[in-house]
Amino acid sequence: MKIVVLAGGTSTERDISIITSANVCKSLRRNGHKANMLDVFYGIEDSKIKGFFEEDNDLDEVASELKEKTKGVAQELENRKNNKKGFFGNGVLELCQEADIVFMGLHGCNGEDGKIQATFDLLNIKYTGTGYLSSAISMSKELTKKVLTLDGVPMPKGISLQKGHKIEYVPFPCVVKPCCGGSSVGVSIVHNEEEFKKAVDLAFSYEDTILVEEFIDGREFSVAVLDGKALPVVEIEPVEGFYNYENKYKAGATIETCPANIPEDVSDKMKRWAEKACEAAGVHTYARVDEFLSKDGDIYCIEINTLPGMTPTSLIPQEAQAVGMSYDMLTEKIIEISMEKYK
């Protein structure tokens, strides 16, 4: 098949998206597909559009070039706003329409929030992953909490705050985080008023809506759901601090155990809640649900990632490996499941 691996974008997770997309594209080529990476925001030169799917380029070099452009994203966004130009880069929609399917290698806003999925639906472009509505719900931690708790899924108690709102009393410790951010960017664990003020300012520097949640003292886990069925549970143990951006993507910063060393009945409950969370939010194809196990033995779902990372340190490839599914088998499975929804 001819496949566009859509990368980059404008979110705080742009560089992680580029790593994911390079890995996925290499895998798809090994699987025999005519695949190539494309930056959704910067696009491609006119001269390269014609031979895009046949190009046997060095994907590591492409990734490096795209990362170099990251520092210019804010200025380019401002330029396009002033010149009344849109989000999609040159040639992007044209190539995506020509492809048999688009592999969504994007993370974060303008990629994982349903906007691009909705555009593709209107243009009859096939893409991997769940649809626009479930993407939008899952991207907003505020909406996720409202939807999942109504369906009985256990989640930490919390409130949302808008910029300018009066902040009421909050019990410590607590967790402060942007409403729609990913990769734990802007997330803080706070223990007193001074830390709380700094954490709120940090979270508001990323978004106008933030969440303040009770801190769950316990162990952190993640459960991938592939085609409606949960994969083995993985436990996440940062060597220092919590599972923040650095610990997620720095090799050796986190100990990941898969399958997790927990009783079978606890593992089964975590899997069921992950499946239930995806079902409640309408998420299909594949996703990853983050969960906590408190010291009292209670399970809490934290969030749903509808386009989980596929980097060398990402969790879903590890969970797939635990059931005998290699990285190349996983990318092929995602393509296969995604194509099913168009039949």
Image (cartoon, rainbow, N blue to C red):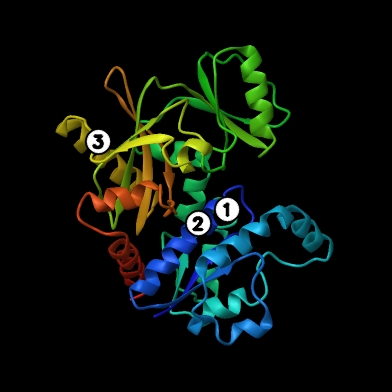
Local SS, label 2: helix
Helix, strand or loop under label 1: helix
The N terminus lies in which quarter of the figure?
bottom left
| Residue 239 % position (x, y) | 41, 28
User: Residue 29 appears at what percent x and percent y?
Assistant: 39, 74
Query: Residue tagged by mark 2?
Result: 19
Disc with the residue nearer the chain's start (2 vs 3): 2
Foreground tag (2 vs 3): 2
**In this image, 244 relative to 226: left or right?**
right
Q: CA distance from mark 2 to mark 3?
A: 26 Å
**Amino acid type for the residue under numbered disc 1:** Asp
Q: Residue furthest right?
A: 82
- Residue 299: quadrant of the picture: top left
Seen from the viewer's position, the closer of residues 123 and 37 is: 37
- Does residue 201 appear in this view? yes
Residue density around tag 3, few if under 14, some if 14–19, many if 20 or more, within 10 Å? some
Q: Secondary structure at mark 3?
A: loop
> How far across and how far down the image is residue 3, in percent?
45, 75
Give the camera-side residue of 6 and 135. Answer: 6
134 or 265, which lies in front? 265
Label pair 2/1, CB-CB below 8 angstroms: yes
What type is the residue that disc 2 sits on? Ile
Residue drawn at x 34%, y 50% as measured from the top left: 316
Q: CA distance from mark 2 to mark 1?
A: 7 Å
Residue hosting label 3: 260
Which residue appears at 60% of the width and 66% of the height?
A: 40
Q: Amino acid at mark 3?
A: Ala
Q: Are marks 3 and 1 in contact (CB under 8 Å)?
A: no
Q: Which mark is residue 15?
A: 1
